């Protein structure tokens, strides 16, 4: 019988991979205002609105993902929110790459339809889009140094990493 060997999520990552827990928080019953007030009272932050993200720290961030859904990093929901949210842990299902701001914008723009110009995609903004053929949620936290975080499905992480490496090499040759 073959032995099981743990393999890294991504071999030789081109950019750092965020090592943190991730979860989707989804509103029960669609009462977003009530949920946002409950999160503020229990967690001390307000869930961001459409196309936005907030960063409490480098490892604690919340990103609007879809109506009544947020991608939350590094924050476990307290029991007091159980009547307000459905919680779907995603740490094994997603991989988050952290790209340096300007270089990341240039790389992602080659495969993305979102305008990533610094005057269009500002700190605190988030979007879901295809990047090349990968569905990704990406955001720019309001932290220094400026970075762009990109969450892709874990099963595509190695391929996305290869695409990033290819794009990086092609830009360095210009």
Image: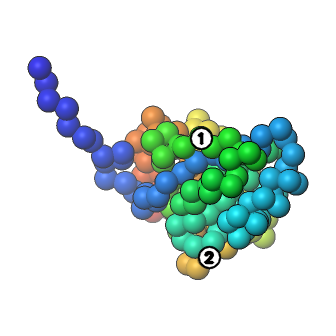
Q: Position of residue 70 (x, y in %)?
A: 70, 50
- Pointer 1 local density, CA inside 10 Å: few below 14, some 14–19, many at least 20: few
Locate the N terminus by quadrant: top left
Question: Which comes before the other along the chain, label 2 or label 1?
Answer: 1
Which of these two is toward me, 64 or 85?
Answer: 85
Please name the residue shown 42% across and 52% down the image. 165
Mark 2: which secondary structure?
A: loop
Q: Position of residue 67 (x, y in %)?
A: 81, 44
Residue 75 - label: none
Mark 1: which secondary structure?
A: strand
Q: Are marks 2 and 1 in contact (CB under 8 Å)?
A: no
Is residue 117 shown to the viewer in this render? no
Quarter of the image where one finds residue 141: bottom right
Which of these two is toward me, 30 or 9?
Answer: 30
Residue 88 - label: 1
Of all residues shown, which one is farthest toward the left?
A: 1
Q: Position of residue 120 (x, y in %)?
A: 79, 64
Which of these two is toward me, 129 or 5?
Answer: 5
Please name the residue shown 64% across and 69% down the image. 55
Image check: 130 left or right of 172?
right
Please name the residue shown 71% across and 70% down the image. 44
For label 2, the residue is 143
Vertical side of 56 occupied by 70: above or below: above
Disc 2 vs disc 1: which is toward the camera?
1
């Amino acid at each position: 019988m073959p032995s099981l060997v743990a393999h890294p999520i991504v071999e030789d990552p081109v950019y750092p991979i965020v090592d943190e827990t991730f979860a989707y928080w989804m509103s029960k019953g669609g009462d977003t205002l009530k949920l946002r007030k409950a999160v503020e009272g229990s967690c001390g932050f307000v869930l961001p609105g459409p196309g936005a993200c907030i960063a409490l720290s480098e490892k604690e961030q919340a990103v609007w993902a879809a109506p009544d859904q947020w991608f939350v990093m590094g924050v476990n929901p307290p029991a007091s929110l159980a009547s307000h949210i459905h919680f779907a842990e995603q740490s094994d299902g997603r991989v988050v790459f952290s790209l340096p701001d300007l270089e990341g914008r240039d790389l992602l723009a080659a495969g993305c339809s979102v305008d990533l110009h610094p005057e269009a995609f500002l700190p605190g903004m988030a979007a879901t889009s295809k990047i090349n053929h990968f569905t990704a949620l990406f955001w720019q936290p309001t932290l220094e140094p400026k970075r762009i975080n990109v969450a892709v499905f874990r099963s595509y992480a190695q391929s996305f990493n290869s695409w990033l490496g290819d794009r990086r090499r092609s830009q360095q040759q210009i």
